[in-house]
Image: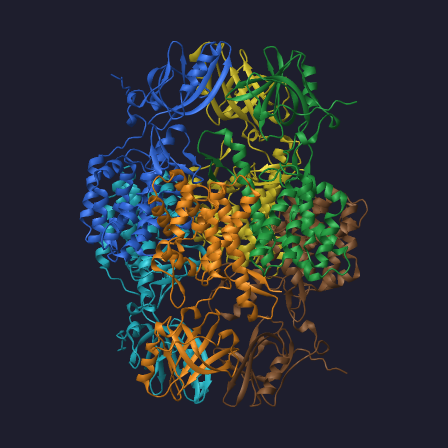
Chain colours: A yellow, B brown, C cyan, D green, E orange, F blue
Amino acid sequence: MVKVYRKAQFINALKEGDFVDDVFVVKIKKGISQYSKGYSFELLLSDNTGKNLDYKYWGGADEEKIKLLYSSISYDAIVHVQGKVSFYNGKNQLATNEPFIIEPLSPEQYDLQDFIKSNKQDIEKMYSNLIRSIGLVQNKDLKSLLEKIFNDEGFAKKFKQHPASIEIHHNWVSGLLQHTLEVLNYCMSSANMFPELNKDLLITGALLHDIGKLEELVVSSRVKGSIKGQLVGHLPLGLIYVSNKIDEIDGFDQNLKNKVLHMITSHHGKTEYGSPKEPMFPEAVALYYADEMSSKIAEILEFIELSKDDTEDEFIYNRRHKKNIYLK
Amino acid sequence: MVKVYRKAQFINALKEGDFVDDVFVVKIKKGISQYSKGYSFELLLSDNTGKNLDYKYWGGADEEKIKLLYSSISYDAIVHVQGKVSFYNGKNQLATNEPFIIEPLSPEQYDLQDFIKSNKQDIEKMYSNLIRSIGLVQNKDLKSLLEKIFNDEGFAKKFKQHPASIEIHHNWVSGLLQHTLEVLNYCMSSANMFPELNKDLLITGALLHDIGKLEELVVSSRVKGSIKGQLVGHLPLGLIYVSNKIDEIDGFDQNLKNKVLHMITSHHGKTEYGSPKEPMFPEAVALYYADEMSSKIAEILEFIELSKDDTEDEFIYNRRHKKNIYLK
Amino acid sequence: MVKVYRKAQFINALKEGDFVDDVFVVKIKKGISQYSKGYSFELLLSDNTGKNLDYKYWGGADEEKIKLLYSSISYDAIVHVQGKVSFYNGKNQLATNEPFIIEPLSPEQYDLQDFIKSNKQDIEKMYSNLIRSIGLVQNKDLKSLLEKIFNDEGFAKKFKQHPASIEIHHNWVSGLLQHTLEVLNYCMSSANMFPELNKDLLITGALLHDIGKLEELVVSSRVKGSIKGQLVGHLPLGLIYVSNKIDEIDGFDQNLKNKVLHMITSHHGKTEYGSPKEPMFPEAVALYYADEMSSKIAEILEFIELSKDDTEDEFIYNRRHKKNIYLK
Amino acid sequence: MVKVYRKAQFINALKEGDFVDDVFVVKIKKGISQYSKGYSFELLLSDNTGKNLDYKYWGGADEEKIKLLYSSISYDAIVHVQGKVSFYNGKNQLATNEPFIIEPLSPEQYDLQDFIKSNKQDIEKMYSNLIRSIGLVQNKDLKSLLEKIFNDEGFAKKFKQHPASIEIHHNWVSGLLQHTLEVLNYCMSSANMFPELNKDLLITGALLHDIGKLEELVVSSRVKGSIKGQLVGHLPLGLIYVSNKIDEIDGFDQNLKNKVLHMITSHHGKTEYGSPKEPMFPEAVALYYADEMSSKIAEILEFIELSKDDTEDEFIYNRRHKKNIYLK
Amino acid sequence: MVKVYRKAQFINALKEGDFVDDVFVVKIKKGISQYSKGYSFELLLSDNTGKNLDYKYWGGADEEKIKLLYSSISYDAIVHVQGKVSFYNGKNQLATNEPFIIEPLSPEQYDLQDFIKSNKQDIEKMYSNLIRSIGLVQNKDLKSLLEKIFNDEGFAKKFKQHPASIEIHHNWVSGLLQHTLEVLNYCMSSANMFPELNKDLLITGALLHDIGKLEELVVSSRVKGSIKGQLVGHLPLGLIYVSNKIDEIDGFDQNLKNKVLHMITSHHGKTEYGSPKEPMFPEAVALYYADEMSSKIAEILEFIELSKDDTEDEFIYNRRHKKNIYLK
Amino acid sequence: MVKVYRKAQFINALKEGDFVDDVFVVKIKKGISQYSKGYSFELLLSDNTGKNLDYKYWGGADEEKIKLLYSSISYDAIVHVQGKVSFYNGKNQLATNEPFIIEPLSPEQYDLQDFIKSNKQDIEKMYSNLIRSIGLVQNKDLKSLLEKIFNDEGFAKKFKQHPASIEIHHNWVSGLLQHTLEVLNYCMSSANMFPELNKDLLITGALLHDIGKLEELVVSSRVKGSIKGQLVGHLPLGLIYVSNKIDEIDGFDQNLKNKVLHMITSHHGKTEYGSPKEPMFPEAVALYYADEMSSKIAEILEFIELSKDDTEDEFIYNRRHKKNIYLK
């Protein structure tokens, strides 16, 4: 029976002098060099803490062997590493000296959850909250559509695990589900404040707006964009998916179809953010801002979480938004 | 005792052939012309329906008298008008022929409520909701600040009546109060979803963010910008006001002061929207989007309400946002 | 048997004093007014020259009858008009005085070709040029796709007649076909100059890029946007259509599918022009510029054609592009 | 009595082989590493020439001792260093080998002037020029306001020393005073050329426009932004300050107050540069351009001064303005 | 001998009831209409006050005669008009009833100065100030260049009269000379404040920067763009002119030539304002801001001058800059 | 007789362990360092493959000698190098150990063609294609102009060799000629599709639009911008050149001159891309898009060619256009 390595030593908790015997994911391969005693190579490792770790393998004089080892480790591979942590150039570095080892693992030898950031919330509870919201929908066409999609077992299994983005925000297990619920919550707040809004449309828009992300992102040892996702984008992929699901329902109201497709098309709010159409009715406006609010608050909280240990300053520069973020 | 004219005939309900004997506000004065029987003048009238009405006075040959009458009617004046509605150039027109009259009224002769769009909600209930939210604040500095401001009777009286803008959104009696509560609601939704957010700061920001509007807008027979408001703006006026109120509280935490001022400074979200600083911490981000969400949803609902009767088309063009709005 | 009115008197050729007995389309209804002898109403008429004509009906004192006549004429209706051309306010005006008439026509009474700008080129020849280009495609998946779509008789019939836009460019019978061929020509020029380009992809992209316009625009008595088109847009509609057509072909190469969908997604070139993705490979770049070149040259030629008679100046201002156009 | 170290060896004049025994400021701490003979650490030093210097301390085998020394040196500290200059990787590097030392100094041991770029002009003369301009103001309200502020001794002391920015322009001792005088000079030129301009308003605006910088920037061993400055900004801080000073003057004309506050609010010229209002009257326009002219000319001169020794090229790229600057 | 009509009755001073017998320029021709007694036509007149005046000619029943008269009056013509001022639709209107006349004049019959806004300053004094500045130039190449150009008698005659723009700013007789001197003054202020700046280059840049306007604008009965000016622009026209003048000087320093051409090329400051290059050295930066300062202050002063009589409001909207201007 | 070194070992084909004895160009000088056995220095080398190569010289203990050698090698120099290729830090590195050498060469010792990317097409054939297009011009003024320019032998020699840019696109021997022909081809395609276009103007515009690049770029051991080119730009330089050539032709039609100059002025299409005027007539629009199409397709093909070997990913990020490029 295959041994399964489970993670116990996390990068953000490593200290100088620790001996490490654990699994990591390879983010960057930095090449082989010659040194006084033979050949060495360097990697950049990561794990589900989102932090990186410099790695160095100090090999012997057998050039062939080191090259073989190096080429057996591919980009995005999960590796089992034994080595010691030292402090170099102001950062921790993990180094392996023989007879300690580094070896790539096959999928049966590790658990993917160890490499994707995990969710702090109860996934099943979140999903049943989502399903409950479908019960509130009164229009029978929209209710059929949502039930057809979200009650499908295979779909549900995938949707529960999917992240909402590669980085930036909700980039963890069930991130898409969590983001979808946040958007739903803001939409329900809007529906309560503004009785003119159509609650059925808001629920439908909230649940379906990012559904194209199931095809846009792929999750292996890390979250990354699929080729289809990079070339077509989650917004058109979602439109194609939902349009086809609607067409499978006999007698679905065509104006309602137009409205649902519009809400997906326009949910980025502005053409310069990638929406072919800008929101043209109130529910589409409400959905756009709900999506913004959920993603932008999550993003700044994530950013602070990730960077607050990197500085003693009160402020840290955020490159994506070109402004300082206050940390205190 | 002065007769008080109360409004009964609203512009959006007038029909060709109606005889009108009611009060209106003068929006535009269009000048005097000569015609076959003497001198006429034209006005553009309005009332709290937000609609406009063309007006024509057909006077006699006494040039002096007509000029005197015309100049007695000032821009923004409330006038008592008797006349008949006809349909001209595809629009209703109200015309006065002697012996019927048009006469400017003095403030005791009309009720301002007839000229500002009224609120559909219970003002006192809204204000007590606002006061109740102050009770949730646990930080004593912030609680003192909010109580000092919102428990002041004179302040409360003004705040309860104030609109939130000249046009665009929440431009009615208590519009500022209603908008403030909507922003508060979205902030509370955010606080519930994201436990990392500081609820005290969110409540404080929501309640104070638009407080400068009390000085920016003046309400006479219609909502308009004050000179101070046009030259300085509600954002700096709010900053000056809140900064001074804080300084009246002994020992107010200075970092908290900085944060509160930052939330006001940054609540337009981007420098190009008039914020000298963009949001630099999560509560400021949440406040910005709450403000956006409340105002943008209210704006499109208002726009549809005002324009849906003007077209039989499915779409109507919105000049401010340069896009069509779907009306069905 | 129904009399069919065919157009003979075109707006751009009318002269003061002409007696008119012909068909026009109603662009704007301007309402009824009272005048000394009774009731009149005004319209704005148009025909396939793209020019407008002011119209006035001088009716008698029977208010009911005039109102009935006015309301029988709907927006976008085709009307048969008898009247005389006068010169008023610097423009021609067509006026009907009884016993001459204006009457709305039913679809059997006119020929739609008289109201849509006609094409100067041979439609069948253009379509067979398009079909011939499919013969050049060597990849069997792409060839199947194009044949499946363009050899369908019902599709071909519609595609041959369709305009490419409401106004701006190629807004005439077969405009879409003509624009598609121009884009194809530029793509073939690129393929000849740059041997690295994949000619099959270029032909496929050229032929399919605007296919969503078949659902975006509707042609009645004039070209206008469908509700679906306004809410979803021709780019997503084209993606849904082509994606489904591809899925009907067994074993279609999935990477090729991604590329074809990318070319449609990105053919507006920039997100701010409504493309969710910007061109990411050379054929998509070539297609974008081919589309730009065809539409922008056609647009300025159209603009000059339409406006050159309106001014004696050397330059005329183009509002859409905010610059002067030189006419000499 | 404490020894005070005064600077004599400036970074821009150091040459390979020089022995250094002088004071520097610590800009970056780069961490400790192990090497063949023990432990070393690296710093980045700076002084008032605005140039940086790599620093390396080669310590012995006593790990505890080196760590203690390293942690005694804080970011922004002033240090006394003995060591030798070598040329490494194309740059000078200062290295300390025991028994030579590096030690942090306390504030009594150095003179702050050695670490802030000094001014080439006579500070007292500049300030008396500023005071003289107040004498030209004829409006008594504005004159009182300026006298109240600039005649205050504590204020004057601070204003005389303050820099105008962290980097970019006028970032030296008395930079704010110098910039204020330049803006004043341009305003006086404008007043002379355009007699319609109100000279009193121009002087007031010039003197007060950047007054918020006294709270925005703090000067320790280097110029940096205060937390208040980063969160609120010098423009709102100036508004609050001036508004309060005005309110202390009985009977200050309220329209004049609005104008003065407007000039401060709008002096960045455009909302995207952080002004909540754009200049709305001629003096505000003149002030905006005077501020631009002073700061942009100073900036390019500074940039050339700092970078001309770094290249033999005729051009050097300026990242902030995304263009090449010509150096010959 | 031809009678020369000199202007005495200016549009901004006309009052209801005035009888007018004076000269005007025709800005717009509005076409002929029929009325109860025959044929009338309308024009829009103007004069050097920059104000417009509605004009109506009430002709008799002889259609041929009125058409002949109307077509004898061309766009931009100078006309001699007799008529009476009435107040119609809130504006003055000048109307001619026979036997009073309107007649087009030939160039000998009027003085052009009456139709171009005149300058309030002494032209010869301004020009000698400009010439005096050339005396300050020490570099012999630059001095030769400036003398060659500005000492040419034909050139001087044209330069002295030329306006600096069609509207917006300095759009009057000698406007170009006046603007050039203002730019020179700001440049001299900069040279005094910043000793690093090269005074010779500043003077040269100031004097030559807008020299292409001599070819860009033509002055007939009003200031308008030449075809060459509209198609090529004053910036390239100036470059061609100056480049050729330099090439006529033997041994002119080539790097200096590059710098002078750069200052002309870059004086609009940003590519989006039409400069192919942005300022790359300090003197080019100083010139750009001097040009901005002169034109923007002149523009707002002009705007207020022209519009302050049109409103009783404190603010008036400026379309070009999309903001309100404060008038009090 | 001088030995001429011809290139045989190209950077993109070097492998670890190769011994190199060949010529390279020096792109960056990285300074001298001390190491255990003496002094070393580093360079960055390049050749006409467009690829870079790290270089290290390991010298002995004679500091003077190494410094002399280092300073004899100037930036942009051509060097003769002997050394060995190793693999270091994931990249190839060429290292010289004495007695092998590195030495700068004088111009007679190498062939410039080895350092500029060569063209894959037949230069003489391309030029005769260009000359043939002049034969198609029917307007005698335009024909004279083109013949005067392109039949000049000295001009032709230079034009045949010139690149079209420093990097980005067509940055190789004859790149300008090749780009000019591509633009011509697209213009001819446009002329064939749109008979309203003036073919003579299109040919003239295509041939002359980038002629200023002859003065903008200089070719030594690499392509770089001339000082004149950087300060003035190829667009104004082209305008000056063509304007003067036209003026040498007696009786050249002045409106035609304006049009030709306009096509050069406007060929970047938008002011923000550096055109003082945007295209104002159809031929100028067609030229702009032809230029865009040629350069943008060439650019992405170049980019893929250069970067496809640098990654195993399907996508590579393009910094200039801020998007991923798909490589498969």
Q: Nearer the viewer, residue E137 or E85?
A: E137
The picture places residue E112, in percent across and down from the top left corner, at 40, 69
Horizontal arrangement in the rendering, residue F251 relative to residue B233 (left or right): left
The picture places residue C138, in percent across and down from the top left corner, at 25, 40
Splitting the image into 4 quarters, where does residue C40 fall? bottom left
Horizontal arrangement in the rendering, residue A295 relative to residue C264 (left or right): right
Q: Evaluate whether residue A258 shows in this view.
A: no
The picture places residue C91, in percent across and down from the top left corner, at 36, 76
Residue B127, above or below F145: below
Splitting the image into 4 quarters, where does residue E62 fall? bottom left
Of the 4 image quadrants, the one containing the N terminus of chain B is: bottom right
Numbered label tally: 0
Residue E315, above or below E294: below
The picture places residue F318, in percent across and down from the top left corner, at 42, 37
Q: Nearer the viewer, residue D284 or B254?
A: D284
Q: Nearer the viewer, residue C18 or B282?
A: C18
Q: Evaluate whether residue E18 shows in this view.
A: yes
Residue at the image point whose x is 76% and y is 44% from the top: D153
In this view, the residue farthest toward the right is: B250
Splitting the image into 4 quarters, where does residue C310 fall? bottom left
